[in-house]
Every structure is written in structure tokens, then in C-alpha cells.
């Protein structure tokens, strides 16, 4: 499916989904308060307000995934979200998330205890934009060809319990030579509000790529080996990386936010063993970003 068709299809899915009847149950104990259970199709009920900010960040990233050299990159910072309903996010040092992602809830399950604390599970379709890779990004990529920018339609599952969150997402993307590969991402994190101005998110991340993904980004086929001088290498499905990162947001005023991100990733398995990483680059990947956002 072409990128434009994917985008139109994804937008149609998101626009078509709206809240639908859901079943709910609640019990009350005069000494302990009320417990509630809710599940159904459509948006989950949430007391959290709409959140939105947009801005610009400047980051230091490896020149390609697996490189040991760095380049400066400008990224739009974007977060539009109604918890339990929909989100649009972009601009992150976690490059597994692509350039931007958008999702909408079509199924939810939530529980609220007598203490007021609760947990929520949501899932739905996901549209994700990927930046691709150009062979002129680094001399080590010469002869491997370009991987075009692309848009993939997949799905997501989110679990939130207070400050804790877990996200599982997957979407296909272009991997060169008219192939598409699948990348599955898993993130878990904790959000701490240090004070009224400062919020810190600490996250753990990992990803898994199928055969086409690993071959497209880390493999070297016969024709690529002949053009580049690299040893032929067959990338196979497996865990691609694991990382830890921190995101901070500091309110300079009621509207303006200072954003900072830093993280470390370690490439694994065939991603680490690839000739463009093992002999030409590094399996250790460090990234950082600093930006300014306007909150509305």
C-alpha cells in the first residue's frame, strides 16, 4: 500500500471511530467508598484534561542507526492528547517511534478502586511516519541504497496505572527494494511531578524487527556487497535493541516549556553484528535533544 493510501486509510479509521455504549459496574461500601469497573468500544472515560503543546527541538543523533559519528538534527516537538481517547506525538530521541505517531482508542477497560487510584487499558489503530535512511548520510552506507520515508498503519495497546505506563505498538514501514518490514516497540516508564514546574519521565524501551526489517536496515545482499565492498550479511528476525532514556519538561511560564531528552540504546543480535555496525560503526547509541514548546 502506498504511503498516501496508508495515510488516507488511517485518517478514515481515526475519524470514523467515536464513543459507543460500554458496560460499566460500580459497587459502594459506605466505609470504603466506591469501586468502579468499565469496559467497551470507544473512548474511555478520563478525568485527565486535554493536553497539547507544539515546538521545535535540536538534537544530537548518530548519523544512522549503528553509526559512531553524530549529526545535528532539527525536529518538531508535538504532543496532542486526550488520555483514553486519542493522541498525536512527534519529536523523540526514541527513534523506534518514528517521526510522528497518531492513535485513537477503539476499546478500553478501566478500574477505579476505593482509594481513588485505578488502572486503564486502551487499544486501537496507529498511524506512524518513518524517516527512512539515505546512503549519503554516512560514508559507511555508500552502495546500500536509500530507504524511503514511509507511513505505516498498525496498532497500539496502552496500560496506565497512576504514574506508571506501558505501551506496545507495531506498524510496517518501507525497508528498501520495494519491501516492507515490521517493527514492534515496547516502552515502559514512570512519570514524576517534582513540583508545579518540573516533570520527569524515565523510560525503558526495546524493539523487535521481522526478517524484512532487519535485512533492510542491517543486512547486506549480493548487489549491495558488490557496490559497497562490505561483506554479505543476512539480517534475521529478532530483538533489535534495548535502551533507557529520560525526558524532562520545565514550565518557564504558563505557556512556554523547556524540553530536554537524553538516552542510551544498545543494539542487539543481527543489528549489532551487521557490517555497518560491527566494523563501521558502534552498537552503543547515545542521543540527546533540547527544545522549546508552546502549551495551549
Image (tube, rainbow, N blue to C red):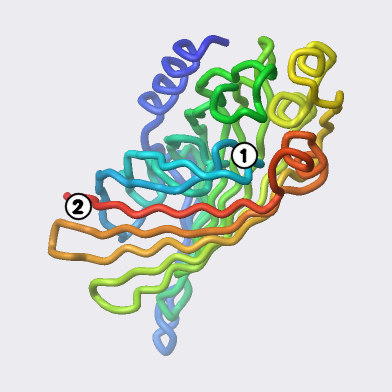
Figure check: 235 above or below 176? below
Judged from the image, the secondary structure of the residue bearing numbered disc 2 is strand
Q: Earlier in the sequence, mark 1 or mark 2?
A: 1
Q: Residues within 10 Å of mark 2 (few under 14, many from 20)?
A: some
Q: Is residue 55 left or right of residue 226?
A: left
Query: Is residue 283 left or right of 2 when viewed as pictured?
Result: right
The N terminus: image quadrant? top right
Mark 1 or 2, closer to the camera: 1
User: Which residue position is annotated with label 1?
Assistant: 65
From the viewer's perspective, is residue 254 above or below residue 267? Answer: below
Point 43% across, 81% down: residue = 115
For disc 1, the neighbor class at 10 Å (few under 14, some 14 to 19, many from 20) is many
Q: Which mark is residue 295?
A: 2
Between the C-alphas of marks 1 and 2, the distance is 31 Å
Q: Position of residue 245 (x, y in %)?
A: 53, 61
- Residue at image position (66%, 35%) is 183
Displayed quadrant of residue 235: top right
Q: Residue furthest bottom?
A: 31
Residue pushed farthest left?
A: 254
Residue at 53% from the left image edge and 58% from the top image edge: 263
Amino acid at each position: 500500500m502506498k504511503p498516501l493510501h496508508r495515510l488516507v486509510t488511517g485518517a478514515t479509521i481515526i475519524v470514523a471511530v467515536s464513543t459507543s455504549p460500554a458496560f460499566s459496574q460500580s459497587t459502594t461500601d459506605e466505609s470504603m467508598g466506591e469501586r468502579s469497573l468499565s469496559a467497551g468500544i470507544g473512548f474511555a472515560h478520563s478525568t485527565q484534561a486535554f493536553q497539547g503543546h507544539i515546538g521545535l527541538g535540536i538534537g544530537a543523533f548518530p548519523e544512522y542507526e549503528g553509526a559512531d559519528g553524530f549529526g545535528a538534527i532539527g525536529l518538531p516537538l508535538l504532543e496532542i492528547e486526550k488520555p483514553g481517547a486519542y493522541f498525536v506525538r512527534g519529536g523523540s530521541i526514541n527513534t523506534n517511534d518514528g517521526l510522528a505517531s497518531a492513535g485513537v482508542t477503539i476499546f478500553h477497560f478501566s478500574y477505579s478502586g476505593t482509594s481513588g487510584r485505578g488502572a486503564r487499558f486502551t487499544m486501537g489503530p496507529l498511524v506512524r511516519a518513518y524517516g527512512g535512511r539515505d546512503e549519503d548520510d554516512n560514508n559507511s552506507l555508500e552502495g546500500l541504497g536509500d530507504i524511503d520515508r514511509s507511513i505505516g498503519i498498525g496498532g497500539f495497546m496502552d496500560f496506565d496505572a497512576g504514574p506508571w505506563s506501558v505501551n506496545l505498538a507495531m506498524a510496517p514501514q518501507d525497508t528498501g527494494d520495494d519491501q516492507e518490514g515490521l517493527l514492534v516497540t515496547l516502552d515502559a516508564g514512570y512519570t514524576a511531578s517534582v513540583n508545579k514546574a518540573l516533570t520527569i519521565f524515565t523510560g525503558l524501551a526495546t524493539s523487535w524487527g521481522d526478517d524484512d526489517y532487519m535485512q533492510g536496515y542491517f543486512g547486506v545482499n549480493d548487489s549491495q556487497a558488490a557496490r559497497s565492498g562490505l561483506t554479505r550479511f543476512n539480517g534475521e528476525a529478532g530483538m533489535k535493541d534495548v535502551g533507557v532514556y529520560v525526558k524532562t519538561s520545565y514550565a518557564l511560564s504558563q505557556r512556554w516549556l523547556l524540553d530536554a531528552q537524553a538516552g542510551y540504546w544498545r543494539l542487539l543480535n543481527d543489528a549489532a553484528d551487521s557490517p555497518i555496525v560491527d566494523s563501521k560503526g558502534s552498537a552503543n547509541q547515545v542521543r540527546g535533544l533540547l527544545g522549546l514548546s508552546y502549551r495551549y
